[in-house]
Amino acid sequence: MQRIRTAPPRYWLVLLVVIFFLGFPTVISSFLASEWAQALILAIAIMGLNILVGYSGQLSLGHGAFMAMGAYISAILAHRYKMDYLATVPIAAVVTGVVGFLFGIPSLRLSPLYLALATFALAVVTPSLIKRPADLTGGVQGILIVQPDPPQLASDVFGAVTGTAMTSDQWIYYITLACALILFWLAWNLARRRPGRAMRAIRDGEVAAAASGVNVAGFKTLAFGISAFYAGTAGSLFALSTGFISADTFPVSLSIQLLVGAVVGGLASIPGPLLGAIFAYFLPIGSNQWVPSQTWLPDQITSTVKNAGPAVSYGVILILIMMFAPNGMVGLIRSGYATLDRRLRGAPDPKTGQMPPDPQTV
Amino acid sequence: MGALLEVKDLSVRFGGVVALDRVSFDVEAGQVVALIGPNGAGKTTLFNVITRVYRASHGTVLIDGNPVQSIRAHNVIRHGLARTFQNVALFRSMTVLDNVLVGDHVQTRSGWVQASIPLPAAVTAESAARKRALEMIDFVGLSTHAERPVAALPFGIQKRVELARALVSRPRLLLLDEPAGGISHEEVDAMAKLLRRVHTDLGVTMLLVEHHMAFVMGISDRVVVLDFGKKIAEGSPAEVQRNPAVIEAYLGAA
Ligand SMILES: Nc1ncnc2c1ncn2[C@@H]1O[C@H](COP(=O)(O)OP(=O)(O)OP(=O)(O)O)[C@@H](O)[C@H]1O
Ligand SMILES: [Mg+2]
């Protein structure tokens, strides 16, 4: 008996995801589209963190600070200097990237634990740093950002599909999606070629990496720079999508949320940050609404969740994921996919050499 | 002038411990030189000084006439010197192929911008690198393992992956730290055959540390013996085996 079926190739999956994200806003409300835009923005920031933590092996507990920087660069350029907001996005990205690169240089001298502390300190001081130059940043009042109207062409196309006019939120969603697609594509290219391998080699062993000719210091600072570039882009887009930023927009918990997303999604993978972002963005919202509405749960639990907010559900789900999916959601999906592929092809298990059961008989 | 590697009057101290004490010897191009000595004699330390992991307290090492102090750790391999590690230092989260591709790092130049965009030059460089890596994996006899994650492989196979990673950069001098350490009898023989091919087919000069005496005597042109950081003998395998100081050191240690 011959079996030639295989699981569908991966690029089908990528195509499906892209089509899904393109079409999604045409069937959901403008408000939901804005929420999904923020999830995508989080995905961009988490991809940046993933390059730093997952690929180069340097821990940052303060990536929210780089998001804040990108956001304020864009907001100040647009608000004060009347620049077109979209033109400020690449400026914010590049400037934040350079700052991240410079931050990476002294970080080379820090042990992993001290690097974690230094980045955490960065996240802690960010809100007060923002409040200080009040003329520039608007202090506690913050800065209002004028959200752009969709251009005629986009509006027409969207109108033709849905029958309703495109809102600013929907337009911002598509801007975000375009940025996310480009940045994920760049990261994918980087990760699977020479620079990505060099970073992973450093993470796995600096001495052996250097013996192979990898400039350890160079690639570590490069990872910091690229990572901050992503965070800066995300911050800039975040300001655009919320329409308002202040010192309190970038609390320490944002940096933690990014790290949780990176770990839960799956470090050192390309789809990981997307899955992690969806998780990290919607879980607190979902659990805040869902848990208290469950009448079968004891009152203590519902009231705790109401008060402690996302912390509780984060905690529970994080523990579950660390127990059952040590490589994050991507690791779980990969192993499931490999099993499916083996079953369909009738190949033996690589570890035990055992043949899978015949799919016709199971 | 002339030797590929010159160790001159080299001393290394760790606090009170003198790991190397005024050691001098040369490795001429084309030779296979063995470095032997009881545990703790300073053999690995010597490798670590040559590859800039440690710093010498006194004396110098010249690679092709260039003092190692003037070469940064990641540039040692660019002077044609590659190494393996005593306890295998592979990139454990990566596949065999990716490990060997990291070894190929110095053969290509494409940077992060070229790789991300990606420019055609980076793409062709990448496929050329893959081809070289696969050839070297084939050379060490691991073609069927190319896509396997290294962490799951047996130790003997890991040693060969490490060898492929060091060889793919086409070094002129290869430092091997116990290539036959911790592997089975059959694997030791296979490793000896493989290293002989590295020497004859690829023309690589070798400096190797090994405890396995039959292995050492079979493969090397010259043997340098260390004991407690001092060089106590140097010569052909036959000469060294007859040397009373060497016999003393080994019996004393055993
Ligand atoms: N990083 C270090 N810090 C302090 N002491 C060290 C260090 N590396 C090596 N030593 C000491 O230097 C001496 C030589 O060690 P080395 O590892 O070079 O021996 P070796 O000849 O490779 O031994 P083996 O055959 O067991 O591998 C030992 O006394 C060891 O404890
Ligand atoms: Mg040793």
Image (cartoon, rainbow, N blue to C red):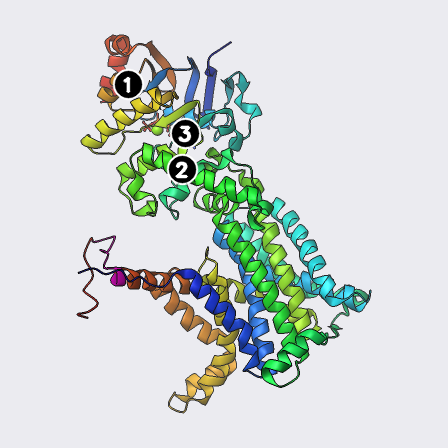
Q: Which is more N-terminal, label 1 or label 3?
A: 3
What's the amino acid at mark 1? Ile
The Cα–Cα distance between marks 3 and 2, rounded to whole angstroms, is: 17 Å
The Cα–Cα distance between marks 3 and 1, rounded to whole angstroms, is: 18 Å
Front-most of residues A145 and A135: A145
Front-most of residues A114 and B216: B216
Indicate yes or no whether the magenta region holds residue B173.
no
Front-most of residues A352 and A290: A352
Element type where label 3 sits in the image: strand
Identified at 54% across, 20% down, the residue is B67
The Cα–Cα distance between marks 2 and 1, rounded to whole angstroms, is: 26 Å
Q: Which residue is mark 1?
A: B219
The local crowd at label 3, few if under 14, some if 14 to 19, many if 20 or more residues have their Cα within 10 Å, is: many
Q: Is residue A316 shown left or right of residue A199?
A: left
Identified at 38% across, 67% down, the residue is A321
Answer yes or no: is residue A221 visible: no
Give the extent of the magenta segment: A343-352
x and y, in percent, of residue A78 in the image:
77, 67
Q: Which residue is mark 3?
A: B83
